[in-house]
């Protein structure tokens, strides 16, 4: 299988700060569903940000779909749900308006085409929000808001979907609905998924690969082979 | 009142500014940079003073100064050299201090200066209306072209960055549009009041709107309505037009806030 993401001997530190990641080498094949877990401050979000070129490594190489990440131009192939995703605007925005914003990755200027409109309807339908398209986000539950942002990330037809703490602040029911949705996206559309969370209980049964990060990669394998004590990531020790 | 040419010119110029200011202000408010208009306005004041000093039309020197000020604020903010409010404060105070020094050197501390500080819409000439129309329509056209990308950045800046949108360019474009709006609106409501016309209609509209589209539509309606109602009030009640326009926009905010409170109770 071709590689969707490759990190080779990557170090990262913030300016004047201690190292966050050291000598990380990590490959994700196209179509994989990978959970990245670890304690707070362990570097898992930084790993995701390096993959999406929101941060640059201090050493090493990052590649997206076989190209150097910083020169990767076909960015509509990337979908991203940021940590504590929330509206950047103060004005009320409807579900359709939020999802439409994600389509700018394919067509940023001028009017929406028929193809854009169809993609927006499909994305809302896929996350089960088609009936709430005209509802302002502020009048939706935390789980529904999260699904609207996932639809926004999906609407450009990404091949790599990166989610940072997508279950933060949503109830258990919404977490289970989310894991089902992601499993379907992975199975039906072959979307490569990177799922970053400090807890992975909600998706443990749907991912095939778990990566634990604490300054480096301390475990990489199927969740079933994870030592029992490590099921609580706060117990991860190098 | 339309039998007077100066009123016809004032309404035409005011309508363009009433339309443009809230459109640009919409993006400033969403970026929580409502006061950037004030910062740029004070740099524009230094530009007016420079115009008097070197004997060039103050409108053009103010426009150049406003663009330089907007670029400085955006650069300081984007490079995290200073936080947004600190960048604004630095440019704001440097602008007003520079203006005072230059205006004193030019010996122009007189009534003409007030036309730029508080507006002088009733003295707008045909040539000025043409300039306002061309620059205003150009700015509106640019917003129309960039609208979807600007909204994507406003809704989720980091997501927009990941999807490859030119975020720095788009943020810079908003600042430039703010500078342009201030440059062409000086004669309408004045450097000290134009920021209010960019912000008040938007924050009023947000109180009662139900979507981004309706927020923008209502902002434009309030901006345009405030200019037309303010000008009418100034004609019949003998009030300064700039002040009357901004007070009308402020009154609209009070009404919108009241409506929002009522809606929540029902």
Image: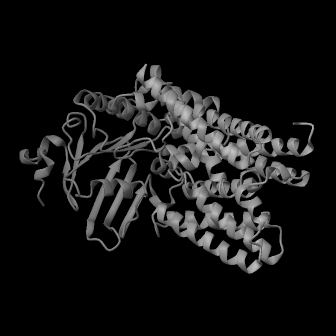
Above or below, comparing residue B85 to residue B247 in the picture: below
Q: Residue at x 52, y 66 (%)?
A: B89
Percent from the top left, x then y, of residue A81? 39, 43
Above or below, comparing residue A10 to residue A86 in the picture: below
Q: Residue at x 6, y 47 (%)?
A: A229
Callout count = 0
Could you say which is closer to the camera, residue A139 or residue A95? A139
Percent from the top left, x then y, of residue B43? 65, 67
Could you say which is closer to the camera, residue A119 or residue A170? A170
- Colour approach in the figure: one colour
Q: Residue at x 67, y 37 (%)?
A: B220
Report the residue that reaches farthest toward the bottom: B105
Could you say which is closer to the camera, residue B190 or residue B177? B190
The answer to whether residue A132 shows anywhere in this view is yes
Left or right: B88 in relation to B22: left
Above or below, comparing residue A214 to residue A79 in the picture: below
Percent from the top left, x then y, of residue A158? 46, 41
The answer to which quarter of the image holds residue B1 is top right
Report the residue that reaches farthest toward the front: B237
Q: Residue at x 41, y 22 (%)?
A: B265
Could you say which is closer to the camera, residue B218 or residue A79? B218
Above or below, comparing residue A50 to residue A4 in the picture: below
Left or right: B2 in relation to A58: right
Left or right: B79 in relation to B221: left
- In the rendered image, the quadrant that contains the C terminus of chain B is top left
The answer to whether residue B211 shows anywhere in this view is no
Left or right: A204 in relation to A12: left
């Amino acid at each position: 299988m071709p590689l969707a993401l490759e990190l080779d001997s990557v170090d990262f530190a913030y300016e004047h700060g201690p190292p966050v990641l050291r000598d990380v080498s990590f490959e994700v094949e196209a179509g994989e569903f990978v959970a990245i877990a670890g304690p707070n401050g362990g570097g898992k979000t930084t790993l995701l940000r390096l993959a999406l070129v929101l941060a640059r490594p201090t050493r090493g190489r990052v590649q997206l779909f076989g190209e150097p990440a910083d020169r990767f131009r076909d960015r509509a192939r990337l979908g991203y749900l940021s940590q504590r995703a929330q509206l950047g605007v103060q004005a009320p925005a409807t579900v359709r308006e939020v999802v439409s914003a994600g389509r700018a990755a394919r067509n940023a200027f001028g009017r929406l085409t028929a193809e854009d409109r169809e993609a927006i309807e499909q994305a809302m339908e896929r996350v089960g929000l088609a009936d709430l398209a005209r509802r302002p986000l502020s009048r939706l539950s935390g789980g529904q808001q999260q699904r609207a942002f996932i639809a926004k990330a999906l609407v450009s037809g990404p091949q790599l979907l990166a989610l940072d703490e997508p279950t933060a602040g949503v109830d258990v029911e919404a977490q289970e609905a989310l894991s089902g949705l992601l499993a379907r996206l992975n199975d039906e559309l072959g979307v490569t998924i990177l799922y970053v969370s400090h807890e992975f209980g909600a998706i443990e049964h749907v991912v095939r690969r778990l990566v634990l990060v604490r300054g480096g990669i301390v475990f990489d394998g199927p969740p079933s082979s994870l030592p029992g004590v490590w099921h609580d990531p706060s117990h991860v020790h190098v | 009142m339309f039998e007077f040419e100066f009123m016809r010119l004032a309404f035409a110029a005011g309508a363009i500014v009433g339309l443009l200011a809230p459109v640009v202000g919409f993006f400033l408010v969403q970026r929580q940079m409502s006061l950037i208009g004030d910062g740029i306005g004070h740099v524009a004041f230094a530009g007016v003073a420079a115009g008097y000093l070197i004997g060039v039309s103050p409108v053009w020197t103010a426009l150049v100064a406003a663009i330089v000020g907007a670029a400085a604020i955006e650069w300081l903010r984007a490079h995290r050299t200073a936080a947004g409010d600190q960048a604004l404060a630095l440019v704001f105070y440097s602008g007003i201090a520079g203006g005072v020094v230059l205006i004193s050197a030019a010996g122009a501390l007189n009534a003409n200066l007030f036309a730029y500080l508080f507006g002088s819409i009733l003295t707008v000439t045909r040539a000025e209306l043409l300039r306002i129309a061309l620059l205003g329509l150009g700015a509106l056209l640019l917003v129309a072209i960039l609208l979807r990308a600007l909204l994507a950045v406003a809704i989720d800046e980091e997501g927009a960055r990941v999807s490859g949108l030119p975020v720095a360019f788009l943020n810079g474009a908003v600042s430039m549009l703010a500078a342009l709006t201030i440059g062409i609106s000086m004669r309408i409501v004045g450097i000290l009041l134009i920021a209010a016309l960019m912000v008040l209609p938007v924050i009023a509209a947000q109180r009662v709107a139900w979507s981004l589209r309706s927020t923008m539509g209502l902002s434009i309606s309030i901006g345009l309505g405030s200019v037309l109602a303010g000008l009418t009030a100034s004609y019949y009640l003998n009030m300064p037009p700039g002040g009357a326009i901004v007070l009308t926009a402020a009154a609209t905010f009070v009404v919108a806030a009241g409506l929002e409170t009522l809606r929540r109770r029902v």
